[in-house]
Structure formats: C-alpha cells, structure tokens
Image: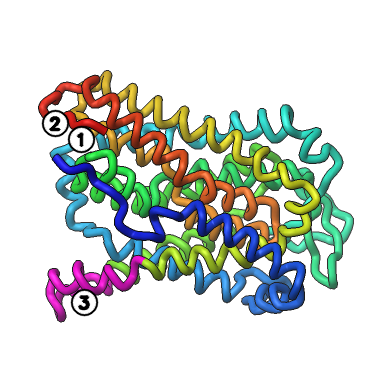
Amino acid sequence: MKDREMTSIFERYLTVWVALCIIGGIALGKLAPELSHKLDGLAIYVNDAPVISIPIAVCLFLMMYPIMVKIDFGSVVKAGKSGKPVLLTLFVNWCIKPFTMYAISIFFLGFLFRGFIGAEATDLVKMPFGLDPAVGATHGVGTVVLHEGVKMLQIPLWRSYFAGCILLGIAPCTAMVLVWGFLARGNDGLTLVMVAINSLTMLILYGVLGGYLLGVGRLPVPWQAMLLSIVIYVALPLVSGFISRKWVIATKGEIWFKEKFLHILTPITIMALLATLVLLFSFKGETIVAKPLTILWIAVPLFIQTVLIFCLGYGLARLLKLKYEDAAPAAMIGASNHFEVAIATAVMLFGLSSGAALATVVGVLIEVPVMLMLVKICLRTQKWFSNPEQTVNP
C-alpha cells in the first residue's frame, strides 16, 4: 500500500517557515520597532489598559476558524462506538497532561535552567483583566509598575516562560493532528471525532485548569480573563465554523465544500499563523539576540513532555488492546498541542511581548520535527497491536 505523505508545502516545511518568521520578526523589530508597537496599540481598551490586540485577534481568528469549520459535530454522536480510544484520549489530555507539563516545566525552567535564563531577569506582562491595583502593589509573584503610562506586572522571566508552557500543556490537539494521524495510517474518522470532542471539552476545562495551574504557579489570573479568552478564541470560531459549515453545505453541497471551500481555507490558517509569529518575534528579538539559547531552554521541557505523553498514551492503548489504527491517533492527539489557542491565550493574558507568548511559539517551532519522529515510531511498532494484517513498511 502506498505511504501517505504531506501534500501541502505549508505543512511539509512548517518548521522552515517558523524559522524564517523568527528571522523576519527580529529584523522587523530592529528596522521598524515603531510599526509593531503601533499594531499592538490597535487594541480594545478597558480602564485605559489594552485587553485585546485587534491585529492579533484577527490573525488568530483566521487561524482557528478553518480548523473549526472542518469538524462535523454531528459525528460526535458516533463516538460511543469507539469508547475506549475516546476515553483514553480524554483521560490523558485532561487528567494527566496538564499536571506533567506543570511538573516538567517548573523543574527545568524554575530550577535546572533558571541560572541560564537569568535568576534575576524579569518580564513585563499585561495587568490581569479585571484588576486595577496601585503601582507598587504585589500580585502573586509580580509587582505592579508603570511602563510607558500603562500599568504592567513585573514578574520573574522564567515564570513567564513557565506560564506559556502551562497554556500549551492544557491545549491538546490541533488541526495538525489530522496530518499526524493520516501519516501514521490511523483511523481518520476517529481522529476527526476526537478533535471535535476535544474542542467541546476545551470550552469547559481549558479555563478551569488554566486558571488553577497558573494560580498554583503564583501567576493568578482572574476567571474573567480566562473566560474572555475562551469566548473569543475557542467559542467564537467554533460557533462561526459550525454555522457557516451548515450554510455552505446547504447552499453549495458537500462536494463543493470539501473540494473548493476547505482548499481555499487551508493556506489561510498557516499564513495567519506566520503573520502572528512575525509580530511576536518583532517584540522578542532583543531577548533572542542577547540570549540565543533561550529557545533551547524552553524547547527542552516541551520536547520531554511531548514524548512522555505520547509514550503514555501509546502504552495504555496497547494495554487496552486497541487496534493500531485507533491507538496511533489516540496517542498523537495527546502529544500534539493546540498551539493556536495557546498563542491566543498567552497574548491576551500576558501580552504580545511577553515571555509566555514566546514559549507558546517555541511549541510551534518543535511541533513538526517531533511529531514526525513520533509518526515514524508508530509506523515501526504496528506489530505491537492486534491487527498485523494492517501493518505496512514505514
């Protein structure tokens, strides 16, 4: 049987595009620093503080909408026929993954790599939405300061990176998991169902777990902030995708929807992602140039977390005696991160120039090479499962 391959040049070379965006963003920050500041200044303000960056909100909606419109939520009802893999995915994603990410990231960033990051280095992040303490007051591990006429929270830099890792750890499954499941010769229908279920689950658990873990990490975020983030970056594109999918299929037919409409949307997602990355790195260029190993310090815990969650999900799938085509996507969904939501939430909660936003971008940078490695592992271990007749040579 012919091996499956990525046909989109955007998907195949995503790591290359991200690397180019890093270079382009740093160059933009050096050559035209006023441009990125002006773009970030186009925001919705509450109490004279920027809460939602309009350019970033537009880019992130364009990232999320094509993902949501692909999902047939009517297929969720069929999930009962595949109970074990769905329950396994939900268990790993929401009962284990957030807490292992917390433990791994605080060990590496707060202890092992803290000296390399800078034990006394600080980061300026946005004041949590809904709070208006006086300058000099403390909030968690941060101190309220006045920066360019706007109240900001000054926190240890490593904790800012830690917050970004947490937001990645509670964001399982992305549109790219459809690619990883496809390449691993998994059950595409089951993958779509689990993507839909995870998207719905995020509406409830993302804010709850995010608020709890950030609070435990001494970076408390008011529930209003997490709720606003979920409404804008998950619920809005989800509802828009659901309604427009129904309308397009009703007016143009399902064939036109799949062959024309989705074909147009796919590159829009990647282009919006890349535009967002350029803006992010235009702010963080100074940090990266001064400390080029910063990306490595963040990447190490993210890499370990990804491999650990994959091994756990894949091992449990074998213990549950799942078929290979169900086991592969079940393990991939936990390992892969919904970096679109993580980036959006980090920007909203902590700001475009924050270390938290940078940490979520590192998740994008390592996504493709690490997940391709895991795809290869799946293909080479199909014989571990109970359907050897499905085995193909990688």
Q: Which residue is mark 2?
A: 390
Residue at 28%, 31% in the rendered image: 379
What amino acid is at disc 3? Trp
Q: Secondary structure at mark 3?
A: helix
The amino acid pointed to by label 1 is Glu
Residue 46, can we see it?
Answer: no
Examine the residues drawn in magenta and state their main secondary structure.
Answer: helix
Contact between labelled residues 2 and 1, with CB atoms less than 8 Å apart: yes
Nearer the viewer's eye, disc 1 or disc 3? 1
Query: Residue 354: where, in percent of width, then height?
Result: 70, 56
Residue 366 magenta: no
Mark 2: secondary structure: helix
> Tag 2: residue type?
Gln
Residue positioned 28% across, 67% down in the render: 242
- The reply to whether residue 267 is in sight is yes
Q: Is residue 237 left or right of residue 250?
A: right
Based on the displayed image, in which of its 4 quarters is residue 243 positioned? Answer: bottom left
Q: Which residues are magenta?
A: 243-266
Decide which of tag 1 and tag 2 comes sooner along the chain: 1
Residue 176 at x, y = what percent? 37, 51
Left or right: where does residue 76 sit relative to residue 220?
left
Residue bearing the label numbered 1: 325
Residue shown at the point (36%, 54%) measured from the top left: 175
Dividing the image into 4 quarters, which one contains the N terminus? top left
Q: Residues within 10 Å of mark 2 (few under 14, many from 20)?
A: some
Q: Which residue is mark 3?
A: 247
Q: Earlier in the sequence, mark 1 or mark 3?
A: 3
Task: Say if 215 sits above or below 354 in the image.
Answer: above
Foreground mark, 2 or 3, reads 2
